[in-house]
Amino acid sequence: MKHAVRIGIILPSGGTEPEYYRAVESAPAEARLYVVISRCGADTGSGDHAVESLIETARIDYLEDAARRLARIGVDSVMWACTSGSFVIGVERAHSQAQAIAKAAQAPASSTSLAFAEAIQSLGVARVAVVSPYPLEATELFFAFLAQNGIETVKSRRLDNRSGWDSALFDQRRLVEICLATDAPDAEALVVPDTALPTLDILPELEQALGKPVLTANQVTLWEAFRLAKQQPPALGCL
């Protein structure tokens, strides 16, 4: 009997798990999803999208603890499904973070921010428009992370969501309107970070309306998870 690919996902909190389960169920090959929760940084009053909270969320010991739980299950790949909890520490430390997760999980691993860089570069894109759910300081760190990977942000819009829960509850029709308004003629793709923000259902509509690739956090996370497991991913927009 053929082995079903086993995808491990580490989330910092709940909210968008249904997107992952539905997408994995639609994969060309039989696949199973295993989700574990990592500890979040303390909310000091500014929300968990505040940089000081994100730096704590990015702690390697927190992620190693979650990854060891996946090791006990046995998975073919692991994704740290948190954009802000990976870009907040910069490219070099994001790679170190992924390496620590891989060692603890005993499986290939990456993170959403690293997956964004891989996906954007795989499309040959160098200039993007960004709809950022985060406040200003975290948004600027995301732009810096993209720039460190040779990706220029030519236009942007902030939602200023204080927390992942704010993103999870954000109105999807309003999000579509904002994404369409944030496009720019010189942007080769639209990028929407934050795995707490549900986006998979609106991908086809956005790509058709914009006529260009749209890359979102849960989309690139799943794409990279299947790529690391050496399996064909579900149909996820341009990927």
Image (cartoon, rainbow, N blue to C red):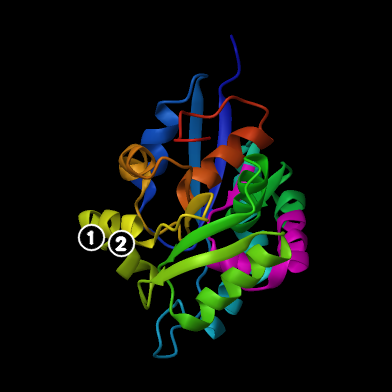
Q: Which mark is residue 28?
A: none
Query: Which residue occupies 77% across, 62% down?
Result: 96
User: Can you identify the residue that label 2 sits on?
Assistant: 178
Q: Residue furthest bottom?
A: 45
Q: Determine whether label 2 and label 1 are within 8 Å by CB.
A: yes
User: Can you identify the residue that label 1 sits on?
Assistant: 174
Quadrant of the rendering where the N terminus is positioned = top right
Mark 1 Cα within 10 Å, few/some/many (few <14, many 20+)? few
Label 1 SS: helix
Q: Is residue 48 above or below residue 120?
A: below
Name the spot of residue 84 as percent of width and height, x first: 54, 68
Q: Is residue 59 above or below residue 228?
A: below
Label 2 SS: helix
Name the spot of residue 142 as percent of width and height, x first: 58, 69
Cα–Cα span, label 2 and label 1? 6 Å
Whether residue 24 appears in magenta in the rendering, the answer is no
Q: Is residue 235 above or below residue 210?
A: above
Query: Which residue occupies 48% across, 42% down?
Result: 213
Highlighted magenta segment, given as a residue range: 78-100
Q: Quadrant of residue 143?
A: bottom right
User: Can residue 43 be spotted in the picture?
Assistant: yes
Q: Nearer the viewer, residue 203 or 181?
A: 181
User: Can residue 61 be spotted in the picture?
Assistant: no
